[in-house]
Amino acid sequence: MLRIGFLGIAHMHSYSYIRQLKSLHEVKIAGIYDRDTIKVKKASDKFNLELFKDPKELVDISDAIVVTSENSLHKEYSELAMKNGKHVLCEKPIATSEEDAHSMLKTAKENNVIFQMAFPVRYAPSIQQAKKEIEAGKLGKILSITATNHGRMPGGWFVNKELSGGGAVMDHTVHVVDIIRWLLNSEITEVSAEYETLIYDIPVEDCGLLMLKLSNGAFMSLDCSWSRPKAHPYWGDVTLHLIGTKGSLWLSAFNAKVKVYSNKNGVIWENFGDNFDASLVKEFINSIKERREPLTTGRDGLEALKVALAAYKSKEINEPVRLSINKCNVKKTKGGENDEKE
Amino acid sequence: MYVGIIGCGMMGKIHSKAYKELKGINVKAVASLSEQQSKECAEIASAKIASIDEILKDEEIKIVSICTPTDTHKDLVIEAAKNRKHVFCEKPIALSIEDAEEMVKVCKENDVLLGVNHVVRFFEAYSKAKSLLEGGVIGKAVMARMYRGGVFPNHGWNNWFNELDKSGGVLVDLSIHDFDFLRTIFGEVESVTARTIKKTPSHPGENRDHALAIIRFKNGSLAHVEGSWAEPENAPSKFRTSFEFVGTEGMITYDSDEDFTMRIQTISEVHLAFSNTTPLGTDPYKHHIEQFIKAVEKKHEVPVDGNEAIEALKISLAANKSAETGKPVKLTEVL
Ligand SMILES: NC(=O)c1ccc[n+]([C@@H]2O[C@H](COP(=O)([O-])OP(=O)(O)OC[C@H]3O[C@@H](n4cnc5c(N)ncnc54)[C@H](O)[C@@H]3O)[C@@H](O)[C@H]2O)c1
C-alpha cells in the first residue's frame, strides 16, 4: 500500500488527482495539508481525508507527495518532501523561477526520489497516437505548428503574480511546449511573445500569443489565452495543427464530445474521452513501484518553464529571446526526420 | 453602362457572372492571354472577345475589371486609368507599396475611381460577425484568430501562383483577405511577427507556402492569422476558412468545414470528390461590384479603395519582412 499526501490543494487539479488516486486499490491517501484552513477543511470533508496542520507531519507518514499548491510554493513543498526521501508529483508549472526549478531538480537527484511533472496532456490518447504517426513518418519532416491552449479565466490566486508567477502565459504555455518537445524530440530555441490584459480587469495578462522556433528548424505559434467565455460550452482546448513535408495533422485533445442542449443547464459539451489525469497518476504510482523515470519529468518541467519566462522577457525587451539548449535535454526516441539536426 | 474584363481565369469568370446579373450593366468585351478562357468568359457575360487595347480604347466602356495575375495589376490599372476607365482591380492591389501608390496616384490624376476586391468584407459569415461585433453582443472585441487555406491553387494561368515574384506568397495573396477584414474590426496595425515556409522541402523549388502571423493593433488588440497552401493535394477539403473573435463578454466563431449547408461526395473524376458548400441567395462578388458601380454613378463611396488596399498590403509585407528577419516589424517600417 502506497501512502500519498497532498501538500497544497489550491490548484483545481488536486480534486481530480484525489479522485483518481482514490480509485486505485494499491494507494491510500494519507492526508492533505494547505496553509488555507478553510480550503483544506472543505476538501477534507468532501473526500473524507485526514487534515494536517503541519506539512512535515504529513510528509513523515507518506511514501509520496502530490504538490498542488500555488505555483510559488511548489519549491518549498516539493523540497520538503524530497529531503525526507519522498517521491513527488508536482503540478505545472514546476515553479515561478528558473532558480527554484533548478534547485528542485538538484534536491530530487540528491535524495534519489522520483520527481514527476503533472503534464496530463502528454498522456492524452490522441497525443500518444500523434507521436506514433509522426514517428511512422506519415507527416515527413514537421515544418510548422499552430497550437492553442485556451481556457477560462481561473481567477483566485491565479491572477496574483506573487503566487502564480504570471497570468495566461505562465498558466498555459507549459502544457503545449511540453507535448511539442516530446512529439518532435526538439527543444524550443527562440521565443517572441505578445500578451496583454484585454478581457478582464485583472492584474495579470489574460491574452497571449507566442511565436517559437524549434531546434529541428520548425516554427510554431501558441495561443495561451484565457479567452473562453463563461458562455462557452466547454472550459477550453488543446489544439495542434502540424504541417509536414508529407502531410498535415490536426488534433484537438479534448474534442471527444457529445453536445448537450439542456433547458436546465444550457448548452454543454460533455467529454467522453479518457481521463488524462487517470493515466498521469497511474504513471506516478508505476514509476515509484518500478523505480524508473516517469514519462514527464522535473527536467521537462524546467524546459517548459524556461519558455514561459522567455515569453515575458521577450515582450519586455521587444526582441526574440534565444534559449541555449543543452543537448542532453532532448530525450532520444526514434524521431526519424524530426530529430534535431547536429 | 458598359464594362470590360481583362483576365478570364477563375476571377474573370466570377466577375463575368456578377456583372451579367446586374441590371443596366453590360460586359462589352473580355480579354486574356488564353483563347479558351476568353471564350468561356465571353459566353458567361454575353460579351465579345477583344484585345486589351480594344477594351481600353473603347469609349463606351466605363469600367474595367482587372482579373489578371497580381504582378500585372500595376501596368494594367495604370493603362486603364490613363484611358479614363474606372478600375475594379482584384486583390492584392500590387506586390509593392511603391507600385500601389503609383496606381492610386494615376487613378486620381485621371479622375477615375479605383476599387480593390477585398471581397471577404462581403462574405455573409464575415459581415454577419462584423455586425454582431458592432452590436456589442460579445462586448468589445479584443482578440481574433483567422485561418484561410488548404491545398495549393494549381488552376493559375501558367501556374503563376507558384512564382513568388508573381503571387507574393501566401501572406500577400491569401492572408491579405484576413488582414483587410481585421482592419475593419480593430483598426490600424502596430506591428507584426510572422513566420513563413515559402518553399517546402517536399516541393523543392516550388511555392507551397504556409504562414503564421501575430498582429498587434494600435488599440492593443491581438490577432493570430494562419494562411496555407501546404495541405496535401489529395486532402478531401481543399479550402477552409475560419475565424474566432473574442470579446470582453463572449466569443463568435465560424469554420467553413463545420458550418455549411451542403456536402457533395462523388466518384466523378471531373468534379471534386468531396466538397462542403453553403449555397446562398446572395453573391458577395456581385454585392461588392454593385457597390462599386454605385460609386461610379456617384451614389456611394468606393467600398474598398486603393488606400485601404495599400494598408492591407502593408500588413502582408510587414509579415513577410518579419518572417525574413525573425523580428517583430512595425507597419511604419514598410515603405
Ligand atoms: N477576391 C478573391 O476572392 C480572389 C480569389 C482568387 C484570386 N484572386 C486574385 O485575382 C487575380 C487573378 O487570379 P485568378 O485566380 O483568376 O488567376 P487565373 O490564373 O485563373 O487567371 C488569370 C487570367 O489572366 C490572364 N492573363 C495573365 N496575364 C495577362 C496579361 N498580362 N494581360 C491580360 N491577361 C492576362 C490569363 O490568361 C488568365 O485568363 C489575382 O490577383 C488573384 O490574387 C482573388
Image: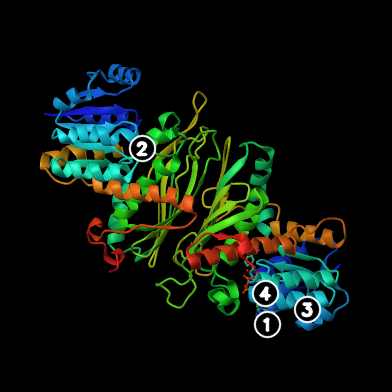
Using the image, name the chain to which the residue with label 3 belongs. B
Please state if B261 lies on the left or on the right of B281 as rendered: left
Using the image, name the chain to which the residue with label 1 belongs. B
Q: Are marks 3 and 4 on the same chain?
A: yes
Q: Ligand 1 closer than 8 Å to the CB at disc 4? A: yes
Using the image, name the chain to which the residue with label 4 belongs. B
Q: Are marks 2 and 4 on the same chain?
A: no
Q: Are marks 2 and 3 on the same chain?
A: no
Q: Ligand 1 closer than 8 Å to the CB at disc 3? A: no
Looking at the rendered structure, the secondary structure element under dot 1 is helix
**Label number found at residue B79:** 3
Q: Is residue B239 visible?
A: no
Q: Real-space Cα distance between discs 1 and 4?
A: 14 Å
Q: Real-space Cα distance between discs 2 and 3?
A: 62 Å
Mark 1 or mark 4, which has the lower sequence index? 1
Please state if A97 lies on the left or on the right of B141 as rendered: left
Evaluate if marks 1 and 3 touch, with contact meaning CB atoms under 8 Å apart: no
**Label number found at residue A272:** 2
Q: Nearer the viewer, residue A110 or B6?
A: A110
* Image quadrant containing the N terminus of chain B: bottom right
Which amino acid lies under the numbered mark 3 shown in the image of this protein?
A: Glu
Q: Real-space Cα distance between discs 2 and 4?
A: 51 Å
Crowding near the residue tagged with mark 2, few <14, some 14–19, many ≥20 C-alpha atoms within 10 Å: few
Q: Position of residue B335 (x, y in %)?
A: 65, 68
Is A33 drawn above or below residue B227 in the view shown? above
Which is closer to the viewer, label 2 or label 3? 3
Q: Which residue is mark 1?
A: B35
Which amino acid lies under the numbered mark 4 shown in the image of this protein?
A: Thr
Taking the spot 30% from the left edge, 50% from the top edge, the residue there is A303
Which amino acid lies under the numbered mark 2 shown in the image of this protein?
A: Phe
Q: Which residue is mark 4?
A: B68
Quadrant of the rendered image holding ligand 1: bottom right
